[in-house]
Amino acid sequence: MGAGHAHVLYRDTPSPVHRLAPEVKITAMVLFTIAVVATPREAFWAFGGYAVLVAVVAALARVGPRWLLLRATIEVPFVLFAVALPFLGAGARTEFVGLSLSVDGLHGAWNIVAKGTLGVLASLLLAATTTTRDLIVGLDRLRCPQIITQIATFMLRYLDVLVGEARRMRVARISRGDDPRFLWQLRGFAAGVGALFLRAFERGERVYLAMLSRGYTGRMPAVWQGSGAATAGQWVAAATVPLVAVTIAATAVVLT
């Protein structure tokens, strides 16, 4: 698994956040998200504080707001669902520009949009500052189950191989008169997907047998030799964001 497997969200920009060990960033992101989720939806000021934290980290990571907002559109389906809640919710209602809206539905919509947006932005910052390879290394250092990290490692290692094979199969179909744009060509497309699955399965069997012949015992060797584990200084630096987030969440719970 080479360095070329950095995912499309990764931004190769030198910054203090990029230099942090992956396990530190993963832990900070998870704790920050938990603090956001645990915050009462009525504590509007708290979400403003979280947004400031995200903005500070984005500035340190040299990730622009336009880049973040464009990729945060992945949550649009959830936002559309949230928009319907004020109209479908029960209980007390309020009037706004001639529309009868559910108060509980408004709070629910705000809860989904605010917490979902902050979670997406935190995940995007993690992806922008950490390569896919380092994410797997960080999960392994955090004692994530080996089966998960190994599956992810092999998926990344052979993803390009499978994509290339699928591209060659498509070119072969087109050269024989197949046109995947038409609905009646769906049968040929489905047959190609099945053939690709069989080839991937057979390739996986061969790779596994080769691993066993080379002494594989259920645990992969270290996948990263270029950097060591996080230092105490990195843990302290990364703990700033989740500590502030937890403080905001605890204050919001007490005041609400």
Image (cartoon, rainbow, N blue to C red):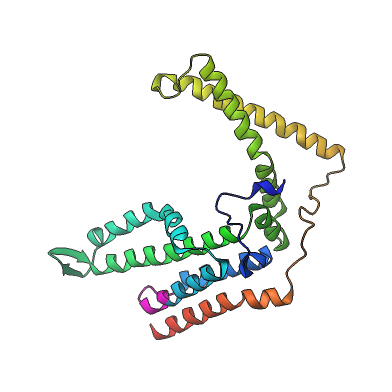
* Residue located at (87% from left, 40% from top): 214
Tell how many labels. 0
On screen, residue 126 versus residue 52, left or right, reads: right
Q: Position of residue 118 (x, y in %)?
A: 45, 66
Name the image quarter holding residue 212: top right
On screen, residue 78 versus residue 192, left or right, reads: left
Q: Position of residue 91 (x, y in %)?
A: 23, 67
- Please, is residue 131 above or below residue 65 in the view? above
Outermost residue toward the left in this view? 98
Q: Which residues are magenta?
A: 39-48
Q: Position of residue 168 (x, y in %)?
A: 60, 25
In this rendered view, identify the residue nearer to me: 72 or 29: 72
Q: Position of residue 184 (x, y in %)?
A: 40, 19
Which quarter shows the N terminus? top right
* Residue located at (49% from left, 70% from top): 54
Which quarter shows the C terminus? bottom left
* Residue located at (71% from left, 77% from top): 233
On screen, residue 126 versus residue 86, left or right, reads: right
Is 73 magenta? The answer is no
On screen, residue 227 versus residue 95, left or right, reads: right
Name the image quarter holding residue 85: bottom left
* Residue located at (12% from left, 64% from top): 98
